[in-house]
Image (spheres, grey):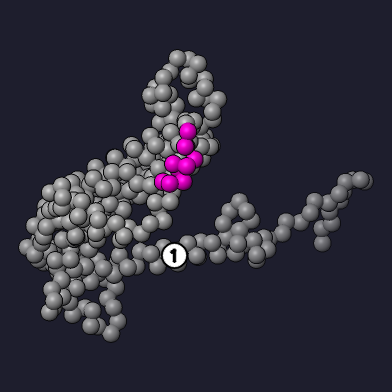
Amino acid sequence: MLERHTTPGQELPAPRRRPALRHRLLGNGLRPGYLTYGLLLAFFIGSAYPLWWSAVVGSRSNEALSLTWPPLFPGGNFWKNVAEVMDTIPFWTALWNSILISSIITVSVVMFSTLAGYAFAKLRFKGNNLLMVAVVATMAIPTQLGIIPLFMLMRTFGWTGEIGAVIVPTLVTAFGVFFMRQYLVDVIPDELIESARMDGANMIKTFWHVALPAARPAMAILSLFTFMSAWTDFLWPLLVLDAGNPTLQTALSQLQSNRYTDYSVVLTGAVLATIPLLILFAAAGKQLISGIMQGAVKG
């Protein structure tokens, strides 16, 4: 048996030990463990399975719901169900209305919320804190309480049945103002604004060259959530729009009848309504993450 020889005063190196079971399961602070990956995988499957199940049932007939075990793989009736959806509802009109409404609302909310958030965060004027408290207080009021007076107001203006009745009430949101204010309070130093003013920049130039570049990560997040919220809105468009000029979400309600509901067709319509959001996430996901990381580094 070989012996290890050391010079006097030299210590033997400590033998390498295998990571403890606790570190392999939970991680060591630098790298996640098996338990973390397992939980993430479980959450992913639990979140993706309803959409996958909708796509599977939407590609089959209505009898697939009566099976003892739910199907796991798509069938061959998807395009037939798509054709039935197109024949039952004004799909392309509803799709265009949803894209138009969601885009206008997103641009408006991001623009006005950034302006208002910057004013509340960095400008000093009387009643600043009181107005901010009033804005936040409106978030505590349920949306359903304002539906009846808002509908009466839209009817007075003669906007019922028009997409303007859906766009105008949501051109700016209290959450957007609060979100941008909280972000800009810490991300923009007061010294940077004072430096811009000393260089001769007025209020608009200071906002454009100082606040706007710093606010881009938060604007990207707010735009994504605003578009998704406007796209999936159902109650208010259902009340204020006509059946011949609906949004995509309200048009899907026309696929159900009082006597019989073909759930495979309904789920096909739901899948078609979800595809634009998936495309948006796939196209803007990388830019969104890079914007978040850029804001984190700057912060």
Left or right placement of residue 122 versus residue 51 in this view: right
Question: 220 and 72: which one is in front?
Answer: 220
Residue 6 visible to an observer of this rendering? yes
Q: Where is residue 164 in the image (x, y as percent from the top left)?
A: 18, 46
Instruction: Residue at 55% x, 65% y: name it.
Output: 35
Give the secondary structure at mark 1: helix
Instruction: Residue at 15% x, 56% y: name it.
Output: 241
Q: Which residue lies furthest to the left in this view?
A: 87
Q: Where is residue 168 in the image (x, y as percent from the top left)?
A: 23, 45
Q: Which residue lies furthest to the bottom in this view?
A: 68
| Amino acid type shown at disc 1 | Phe
Instruction: Residue at 24% x, 53% y: name it.
Output: 150
Q: Position of residue 268 (x, y in %)?
A: 19, 65
Q: In which quarter of the image is the N terminus?
A: bottom right
Residue 269 lies in what quarter of the image? Answer: bottom left
In magenta segment, residue 175: no
* Residue that carries the numbered disc 1 in the rendered image: 43
In magenta segment, residue 127: yes
Residue 214 visible to an observer of this rendering? no
Left or right placement of residue 293 versus residue 22 in this view: left
Instruction: Residue at 15% x, 75% y: name it.
Output: 261
Which residues are the magenta region?
126-135
- Could you tell me what secondary structure mostly forms the magenta stretch? helix
Q: Where is residue 192 in the image (x, y as percent from the top left)?
A: 52, 25
